[in-house]
Image (tube, rainbow, N blue to C red):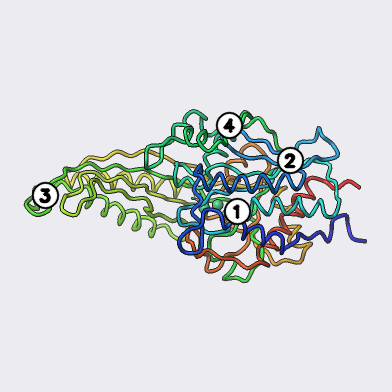
Amino acid sequence: MAAPGENLRINADRLWDSLMEMAQIGPGVAGGNNRQTLTDVDSEGRHLFKRWCEEAGLAMGVDQMGTMFARREGSDPEALPVYVGSHLDTQPTGGKYDGVLGVLGGLEIIRSLNDLDIKTKHPIVVTNWTNEEGTRFAPAMLASGVFAGVHEQEWAYQRKDAAGKTFGEELERIGWKGEEQVGSRKMHAFFELHIEQGPILEDECIDIGVVTHGQGLKWLEVTLTGKESHTGSTPMPKRRNAGLGMARVIELVHEIAMDYQPEAVGAVGHMEAHPNSRNIIAGRTVFTVDIRSPNKAVLDEMDERIRAGIETVCEALDISFGIELVGHFDPVTFDEGCVRAVREAAERLGYSHRDIVSGAGHDACWINRVAPTAMVMCPCIDGLSHNEAEEIFKDWAAAGADVLFHAVVETAGIVD
Ligand code: HGY
Ligand code: MN
Ligand code: MN
């Protein structure tokens, strides 16, 4: 006799249609998305998600960081809810699935429970975390970080984008600043479905990643200051070239990461040269070093070596430097009970699976501090993400959402 819910499956076509409809909002220029946080298109995507949640009978709450919580009642209103979700904001050249699959996969669980008229003991809450990407306003996972007590809300409100606009102003402007106090919601558990954003699952032809850990991350924002001068008439020995300094530090970060790979990675993705004129030596450069490792000692050692290397580069070029740690979390170990729920769900459903460490950061990495948390991963083609060509197959999305469905419903408890 099948256990209650043993054969539960989501509606793969409906999930895929919702993913494709959401992808119409904030289109990129090459088939992906540019729906950056707190932009008008972010707001449009939020309104679509809100409409879908209300059509599914959910009660929507919004907190003071703009995070959206859509609640389905359980039989025991006193029971702490099981939360499930991710993020709808994208990179400027983002894909259609990074984050979105986790939010709409959560909504699909609700839609499927409604279809099957299944009641759970614990309420279930589908969540859209504000500013997971950290590309417009650093750091990444900003709202979930405030929710978990890692960042002060006022500090988050003051974070500035490249145009000097603050997070707080933009949240007010798009009309998504809610009333709820951030972090006041207590959770029975939190689950997040996400594409792997790396090549392992596809290379090994595995359906499901059971995420046991998340690698740690450091973002160092570096400012180098030299002297603007004429590229034609300034003698080479007299130049104080902040652009050359940035180039040398970028190379240094790569070399240090190569020393520790595959247990670490490092790169510089964000780069600014001022005044960025063809015939002026860059007097100032600002860039962000992104280093990551599942091993805290390695991460700290890389940090130390990079800081020492920056000092050496600047001495040689007679330029000065400033370093600000704008993003940081140590390696994460997810909750054993929740991880087991994911693994057993994959087994029950007959999906191939393997334990995996998340290379990317996720809201789950912060929520793991305040509630038992785990993640489900599905493959993505060529392991490509943070690229408009990010792509998955419908049945990969369905397998991930099926496993998420079982893990969430097992944890929420089915009542007749
Ligand atoms: O940077 C990250 O790992 C995430 O995509 N925000
Ligand atoms: Mn993401
Ligand atoms: Mn991302």
What crowding class fits label 1: few (fewer than 14 Cα within 10 Å), some (14-19), or many (20 or more)?
many
**Residue, disc 1:** 100
The local secondary structure at tag 4 comes to loop
> Disc 4 to disc 2, how far (Cα)?
17 Å
Within 10 Å of disc 2 (Cα), the crowding (few <14, some 14-19, many 20+) is many
Q: CA distance from mark 3 to mark 4?
A: 49 Å
First along the sequence among labels 1 and 2:
2
The residue sitting at 86% across, 39% down in the picture is: 75
Q: Tell which circle, 4 or 2, labels the residue nearer the N-terminal end.
A: 4
Residue 236 falls left or right of residue 288:
left
Q: How many C-alpha atoms fall within 10 Å of the one at disc 4: few (<14), some, or many (≥20)?
A: many
Q: Is residue 84 above or below residue 356?
A: above
Label 3: how many Cα within 10 Å (few below 14, some 14–19, many 20+):
some
Give the mark nearest the N terminus, 1 or 3.
1
Q: CA distance from mark 4 to mark 1?
A: 21 Å
- Marked residue nearer the N-terminal end (3 or 4): 4
Q: Which residue is mark 4?
A: 64
Mark 4 vs 1: CB contact within 8 A? no
Quadrant of the rendering where the N terminus is positioned: bottom right
Residue drawn at x 61%, y 48% is: 86
Q: Nearer the viewer, residue 43 or 196?
A: 43
Q: Which mark is residue 230?
A: 3
Residue type, numbered disc 4: Gln
Identify which residue is drawn at 62% across, 28% down.
181
The quarter holding residue 206 reads bottom right
* Left or right of 15 in this view: 139: left
Is 94 in front, or is 257? 94
List the residue tagged with mark 2.
71
The percent position of residue 176, horizontal first and vertical second, equals 57, 36
Q: Residue at left 53%, top 34%?
A: 150
From what the image shows, is residue 186 above or below residue 116? above
